[in-house]
Amino acid sequence: MKLVKAMLFAALVAVSSMASAKTIEMDVNGLVCAFCAQGIEKTLKGFPETAGVFVSLEHRIVAVQLKDGVDINDAALTKAITDAGYKLVAIRRTDETLDAIRSRVSQQKAMPAVDPSKHKHTMGDMGGHD
Ligand SMILES: [Cu+2]
């Protein structure tokens, strides 16, 4: 009986922590210039679950605010970002708003800049690099 209770508790915790995640924060490598940011933003706004997107080139952070009660699974996120030409390094789910993430990230030290001449975008194609 104890085991059943423990399992039930674990299931409840899992459900409630899933339901409470409002924002997905991701570390993404390969974001270099404003076109990268625009491309990734456009890609993520393509998900019907997305309420808003925040991209910090300086910190290689991409955050997706979710609509109420929905989530985008890790596999779909990984595929979208990989297909756009970037590398998804980490995924975190939080209750922070995009504004909270924006202000937290702005306090952090920027990553070393990547030389934008090392990559290029095709005009009109905002996603990924050659
Ligand atoms: Cu770029």
Image (cartoon, rainbow, N blue to C red):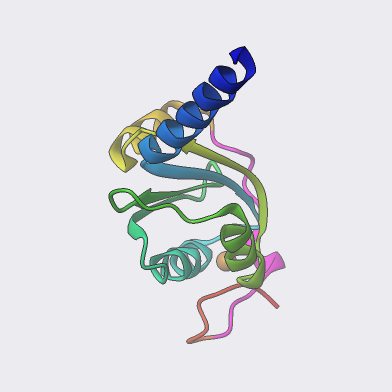
The residue under the point 44% across, 32% down is 17
> Is 69 drawn above or below residue 110 in the view shown?
below
Q: Nearer the viewer, residue 45 or 48?
A: 48
Q: Nearer the viewer, residue 69 or 37?
A: 69
Asked if residue 119 is among those painted magenta in the image, a careful observer would answer yes
Q: Is residue 63 left or right of residue 113?
A: left
Relative to residue 56, is residue 117 drawn left or right?
A: right
Q: Quadrant of residue 98?
A: top left
The outermost residue toward the front is 1
Residue for point 63% across, 75% down: 120
Q: Could you tell me how many numbered marks the image carries?
A: 0
Image quadrant where one finds the N terminus = top right
Identity of the residue drawn at 52% across and 31% down: 11
Where is residue 88 drawn, in percent x and y? 65, 53
Ligand 1: image quarter: bottom right
Q: Which residues are magenta?
A: 110-122
Where does the image place residue 116, in percent across and percent down from the top left? 62, 62
Quadrant showing the C terminus: bottom right
Whether residue 50 is in magenta: the answer is no
Q: Position of residue 68 (x, y in %)?
A: 28, 49
* Magenta stretch, main secondary structure class: loop
Is any atom of residue 108 visible in this view?
A: yes
Relative to 108, 49 lies left or right:
left
Where is 31 relative to 20, above or below? below
